[in-house]
Amino acid sequence: MHPGYGFLSERADFAQAVADAGLTWIGPPASAIEALGDKVSARRLAIRSGVPVAEGIEEDEGDAALASAIEAMGLPVMIKAAAGGGGRGMRLLRSQDDAPDSIEAAVAGARREAQAAFGDGRLLVERAMSEGRHVEVQVLFDQHGNGVHLGERDCSVQRRRQKVIEESPSPAVNAALREELGQAALNVCRAAGYVGAGTVEFMLMPDGSFMFLEVNTRLQVEHPVTEMLTGLDLVELQLRVAGGGILPISQRDVQLDGHAIETRIYAEDPSRGYVPSTGRLRWFEALDPRARHDVGPATGDFVTAHYDPMLAKTIVHAESRAEALARAAEALDGWAIDGVTTNLGQLAAILESDDFRSGSVDIGWLDRTELEQRDAPGDALAVAAVAEAEAGAWRSSGELVRAYLHHGRKHEVRVSRSADEWSAVVDGSENGSAPSGRDWSAEVSAGGVVVTNHERRWVFLRERRRRSGAARSRAAGANVVRAPMPGTMIEVLVEVGDEVDAGQTLAVMEAMKIEHLLSAPNAGVVTAVHTSAGASVDEDAVLIELGASA
């Protein structure tokens, strides 16, 4: 039985139950999952294997005791769920500002989220390192003690400690360091009696030193990056190993060819603090055939608040990193998504940024960086509007005006015709004659226009006349707290009559497996509370009302 890469893949009791039922478990034995899937146990195993770890607090004797230990250790720290990963049950406390309601409240929130996600609320605390890179090593072991590492993946571009872009090889790793990381990964897994595919994660510091973070005892979401770089099918090798076969490769057989990049497409709004976006997908299609697209939903499906917001992954491979960056950007242009807000624009801006292109990002980079949005080509926008005009939208008495959305950014195009030539104004700038000829083509549909130039594709969606939840909230007044998305209330922290400060946390809700803190827009007095713990709420529902202080 193959468990995929969801939560069941790292459940030791589930792996044991599969084996006890007489089925073949495609993954490490339950004993290895138990030893490495638990962050505290894995940390201790790394220490015994001679692999460096960060300063930490392993003993968890409750919220108050752990908070006191954190205060004694000093900030910054990362609070982690001991029994799971994927960003669930994690809290980064860089300073007291990250715990406005107290360190103990932050500990309690992490524990609550860990319990909900993994059925285990135990926590581990480690010294937080914001200047390092997140680098992970893919390993493979058979049942006969043979093991190999397949190079590293750099996963430093993260939001809320969840990965956004992965690439291999890392721009910060040379051949000698690659071998050192690989041997450290093999040592930790070998000590646990590992079998199958797994990933060992490290923090790589600017001086070249590294520290062990954790082991993912499963296939990773980003495994296609390694597959493209090595030419190996990791799932096929998992099946071979699970059947008792010997690994068909040795370490000297592993060759890294070129460069691979994966971009994760999420249903969320980066401009609003990564608030998840829900709704029906009116258009969901990847139009670049040169990239690999691993997708979940399809056009017509409804994206709910009950699951992870990742919609798809797009993976590209090229001979050089520069070529891979260009291919990744082209592949993003070829995505058509309508019905939910996504991070497509942010992904494109990251790939175009000087920091990312130079390979100088670290795990805190995305949180502290304002990205310049990447503009759609004016020529392509002009071709889209001309195609609509020629399809019957234009009348000879005037110009045609079209508003398009590309990766969440609005573009206005005005086209007019003189004699046999079209002219265009794109976003207020004269674009001259609209391009034509066999190099350009456009396909007009009900949702927008797909423009093609050689192998490049751009999807321009027609703007819909609708207000966002944020706009509706502003229109209704600033002294209310609304649900930013559908979800479940975890905790309501105020009552009618309470005086609150601007920015104070008033309630906690859960959506897409993540807790969201809802804060007061202004100082004032709570005049009404319309929800309670455990209640299901719709997007934009009024939860708490505030009045002016006496």
Image: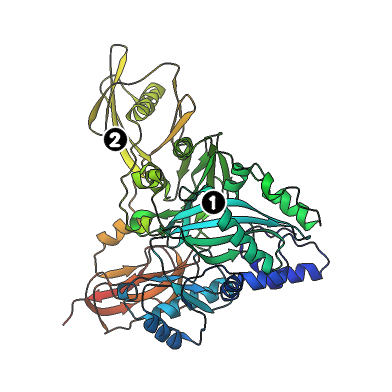
Residue with the most extreme left position: 550
Q: Give the left or right position of residue 415, taking residue 29 as reference.
A: left
Q: Residues within 10 Å of mark 2 (few under 14, many from 20)?
A: some
The residue that mark 1 highlights is: 176
Lower sequence index among marks 1 and 2: 1
State how far apart marks 1 and 2 are (Cα): 52 Å
- Quarter that holds the N terminus: bottom right
Estimate the x, y position of residue 494 in percent, counting from the top left.
Answer: 33, 82
Q: Which residue is drawn at 80% across and 71% down?
A: 20
SS assignment at label 2:
strand
- Quarter that holds the C terminus: bottom left
The answer to which of 424 and 328 lies nearer the viewer is: 328
Estimate the x, y position of residue 204 in percent, counting from the top left.
Answer: 47, 59
SS assignment at label 1:
helix
Estimate the x, y position of residue 198 in percent, counting from the top left.
Answer: 64, 59
Q: Which residue is drawn at 42% across and 84% down?
A: 69
Task: Say if 227 sits above or below 197 in the image.
Answer: above
Q: Quadrant of residue 41?
A: bottom right
Q: Which residue is drawn at 63% across and 70% down?
A: 36
The answer to whether one can see residue 221 in this image is no
The residue that mark 2 highlights is: 412
